[in-house]
Image (cartoon, rainbow, N blue to C red):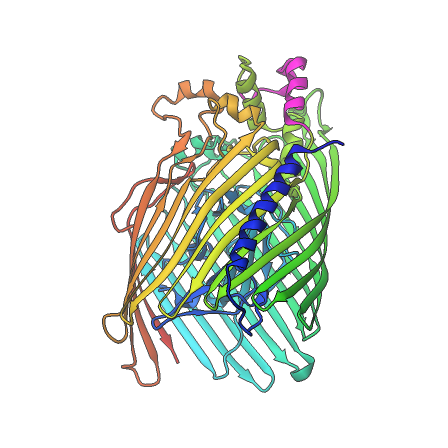
């Protein structure tokens, strides 16, 4: 008999955890009459009067309510809400914001809008999901599920983020809000909500402009949205959503920023900018038996860099166009102690990218992705206080990329005049069956114990595939620089691949290997208690990940599988209401990450085996006071621990000699940010609810780096007013 040691570890871990739960169950003297389903165990929410629950679907889910936040102008998009949630790190950058959950970046998450899957191109120009897609004013709540979650959730490693849009109000309501802050940061928002017969709606739009606080990074954006539905009575409900977003932002041209990530923006001139346009919609039918939805979204990017040393007629341009339609169906039914769900989904990704290189030629690339998923799940009340939810999920993906090559003009082509060079095509695919299980025990009415586990499957994004192929075949400038640094080749970092000796090319390809999907196992064990005065949640998590896709921290980076990654940690969160006038809430995460088999990073960074941008410590504390009617004051403290960042000039190290004033930033130090927010609500204007708002972000003017290409802007003050009638 052949025994797989790793599978044996999984079995042993599962057996130990189940035994612990069995002992806890055996110690219970009696059973209550109330039946408990795992779907009915709510995340915690604290109000000024008591701790209460909202009906959501999992103990591993945190719920964010935007309406509970004081919004004085400091909130620009969803990431400003997420960063106050547990185990989430948000990093701004010169190309967009990145969200990390338990040390894993957002391209490893599954993003849903009203339960509908959204296709992701992957980390491309530092972005994965466009977090500005749904404006904050249109969001009812955000459900953040950590880990693999239930069998409904697929193609995820870090977790699932479900963005739920607002419903129309019963009474007609209009809201107008405006704010102004440092760097001439101005925002204006107008929304209207109401209902007429079976129809309800929430419609609105906003405008935002800000001057630069890093060289050339001024921005301007606007959005519009419509969310609503039609009540069909006993037949169910039809929900609909439409949205559009436009943004224009300048490239960050601070030399230190561009140097840290070895970015081509080092040579850009002031005025270089890019635009983003997101548009989409969805229609969902909901009933007691079946839910069916269709959606489609489109993302366009247009880059317009400029260089001072260009000759007349030179140009450089990059455009991308990404369409991602999706369909989803779920059948659900309850009988006796069982609640069954069966369903499937399909997401299609279709992207085109066009480059126009200055004084060189043009290039066109097609990206395609098919994602299929199917699931079955049974939530079974074994005993009145014991629930077992078991499910299985099937995932399948197919990626294709095709580069039509660079169409050179005249003498710029390698060899003799003109022609097309560098044509390639690549395809990858795979599939997996993944079991999921959750055991929940409720020894007391306000205490829940749970264990959840399941198998991981995450397809490479089409951007992963393109980066891998470009570095495997020596197309990437940064990839060639990393190769030369790794093997100690004394050549200019970005010199043509033809100069690299064949033995190093062969060795590099063996090192990078072929690109595979991420697989592994995910476990979590936790306890939660909710009373009329306080609530807490304590849990332990562990992930054993095979073939983790590592992205080297430079522009156009090497992308490759790492043999194995272990991630484990402890999360604790709590909320306590001292009285109606004062409450405190907070969360803390301790996390360890360890890679095995990443020869590239271990050699270039002296044996370092942590994941990039995964701090061991994350702490959020909020003190909230309501000293008298109408006034709410919040003091927020957020601590982010030291983290491994990598990046240039560690690559290529020989280039550091030309920039002696820049020390390598292999690690980013820990930092603490303090924020103060005030809200005063008055009814002085008859028929109008008026709020005066103030926010002071980073009140101690802490100077630090959130990311290799983003220094914090220091203290920022916002003031705003909101009228609702």
Asked which quadrant contains residue 360, the reply is: top right
Q: Name the spot of residue 461 as percent of width and height, x first.
A: 64, 43
Residue pictured at 52% horizontal, 31% vertical? 311
Question: In the depicted view, which residue is nearer to us: 105 or 682?
Answer: 105
Name the side, left or right, on which 222 lies relative to 283: left
User: Where is residue 198 shown, x and y percent of the image?
Assistant: 61, 84
Give the image location of residue 540, x and y in percent.
49, 48
Is residue 144 visible from the viewing direction of this image? Answer: no
Q: Is residue 495 visible?
A: yes
Q: Is residue 658 above or below residue 353?
A: above
Residues in magenta, as a range: 493-513
Q: x and y percent of residue 355 in the render?
A: 62, 39
Residue 225 placement, left or right of 722: right
Residue 503 colored in magenta in the image: yes
| Residue found at x 47% / y 56% | 527
Is residue 500 on the magenta stretch? yes
Query: Number of numbered discs present?
Result: 0
- Looking at the image, the residue that sits furthest to the left is 627
Q: Nearer the viewer, residue 463 or 287?
A: 287
* Residue depicted at x 52% and y 74%: 202
Q: Quadrant of the N terminus?
A: top right
494 left or right of 636?
right
Magenta: main secondary structure: helix
Residue at the image point whose x is 37% and y is 47% from the top: 212
């Amino acid at each position: 008999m052949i025994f797989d040691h790793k599978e044996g570890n999984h079995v042993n871990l599962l057996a130990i955890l189940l035994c612990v739960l069995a002992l806890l169950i055996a110690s219970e003297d009696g059973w209550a009459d109330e039946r408990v389903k795992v779907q009915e165990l709510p995340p915690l929410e604290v109000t000024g009067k008591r701790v209460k629950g909202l009906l959501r679907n999992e103990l591993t889910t945190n719920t964010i309510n935007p309406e509970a936040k004081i919004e004085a102008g400091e909130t620009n998009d969803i990431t400003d809400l997420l960063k106050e949630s547990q185990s989430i790190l948000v990093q701004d950058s010169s190309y967009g914001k990145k969200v990390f959950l338990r040390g894993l970046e957002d391209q490893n998450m599954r993003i849903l809008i009203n339960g509908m899957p959204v296709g992701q191109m992957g980390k491309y120009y530092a972005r994965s999901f466009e977090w500005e897609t749904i404006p904050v004013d249109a969001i009812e709540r955000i459900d953040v599920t950590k880990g693999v979650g239930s069998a409904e959730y697929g193609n995820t490693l870090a977790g699932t983020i479900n963005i739920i849009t607002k419903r129309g109000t019963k009474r007609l309501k209009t809201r107008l809000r405006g704010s102004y802050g440092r760097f001439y940061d101005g925002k204006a928002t107008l929304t209207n909500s109401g209902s007429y017969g079976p129809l309800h709606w929430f419609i609105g739009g906003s405008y935002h402009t800000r001057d630069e606080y890093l060289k050339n990074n001024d921005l301007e954006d606007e959005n519009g949205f419509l969310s609503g539905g039609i009540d069909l009575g006993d037949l169910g409900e039809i929900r609909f959503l439409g949205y559009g977003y436009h943004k224009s932002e300048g490239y960050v041209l601070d030399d230190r920023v561009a140097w840290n990530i070895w970015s081509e923006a080092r040579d850009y001139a002031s005025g270089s900018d890019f635009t983003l346009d997101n548009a989409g919609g969805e229609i969902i039918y909901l009933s007691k038996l079946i839910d069916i939805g269709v959606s489609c979204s489109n993302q366009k990017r247009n880059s317009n860099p400029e260089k001072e040393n260009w000759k007349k007629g030179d140009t450089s341009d990059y455009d991308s166009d990404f369409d991602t339609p999706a369909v989803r169906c779920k059948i659900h039914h309850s009988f006796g102690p069982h609640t069954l769900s069966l369903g499937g989904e399909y997401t299609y990704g279709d992207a085109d990218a066009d480059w126009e290189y200055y004084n060189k030629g043009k290039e066109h690339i097609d990206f395609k992705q098919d994602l299929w998923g199917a699931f079955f799940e049974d939530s079974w009340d074994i005993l009145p206080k014991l629930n077992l939810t078991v499910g299985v999920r099937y995932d399948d993906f197919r990626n294709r990329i095709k580069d039509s090559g660079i169409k050179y003009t005249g003498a710029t082509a390698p060899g003799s005049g003109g022609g097309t060079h560098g044509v390639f095509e690549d395809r990858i695919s795979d599939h997996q069956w993944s079991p999921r299980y959750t055991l929940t025990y409720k020894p007391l009415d306000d205490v829940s114990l749970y264990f959840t586990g399941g198998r991981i499957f995450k397809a490479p994004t089409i951007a992963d595939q393109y980066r891998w192929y470009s570095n495997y075949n020596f197309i990437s400038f940064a990839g060639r620089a990393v190769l030369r640094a790794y093997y100690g080749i004394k050549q200019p970092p970005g010199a043509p691949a033809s100069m690299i000796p064949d033995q190093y090319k062969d060795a590099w390809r063996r090192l990078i290997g072929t690109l595979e999907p991420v697989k592994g196992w995910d476990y979590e064990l936790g306890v939660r208690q909710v009373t009329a005065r306080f609530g807490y949640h304590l849990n332990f998590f562990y992930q054993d990940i095979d073939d983790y896709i590592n992205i080297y921290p430079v522009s156009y980076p090497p992308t490759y599988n790492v043999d194995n990654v272990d991630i484990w940690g402890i999360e604790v969160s709590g909320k306590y209401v001292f009285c109606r006038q004062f409450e405190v809430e907070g969360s803390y995460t301790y996390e360890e990450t360890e890679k095995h088999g990443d020869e590239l990073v271990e050699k270039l960074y002296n044996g370092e085996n942590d994941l990039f941008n995964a701090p061991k410590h994350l702490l959020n504390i909020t003190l909230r006071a309501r000293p008298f009617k109408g006034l709410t004051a919040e003091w927020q403290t957020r601590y982010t621990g030291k983290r491994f960042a990598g990046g240039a000039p560690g690559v290529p190290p020989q280039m550091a000699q030309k920039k002696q004033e820049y020390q390598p930033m292999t690690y980013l130090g820990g930092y603490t940010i303090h924020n103060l927010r005030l809200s005063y609500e008055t009814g002085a204007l008859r028929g109008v609810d008026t709020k005066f708002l103030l926010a002071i972000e980073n009140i101690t003017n802490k100077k630090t780096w959130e990311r290799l290409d983003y220094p914090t802007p220091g203290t920022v003050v916002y003031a705003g007013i909101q009228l609702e009638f």
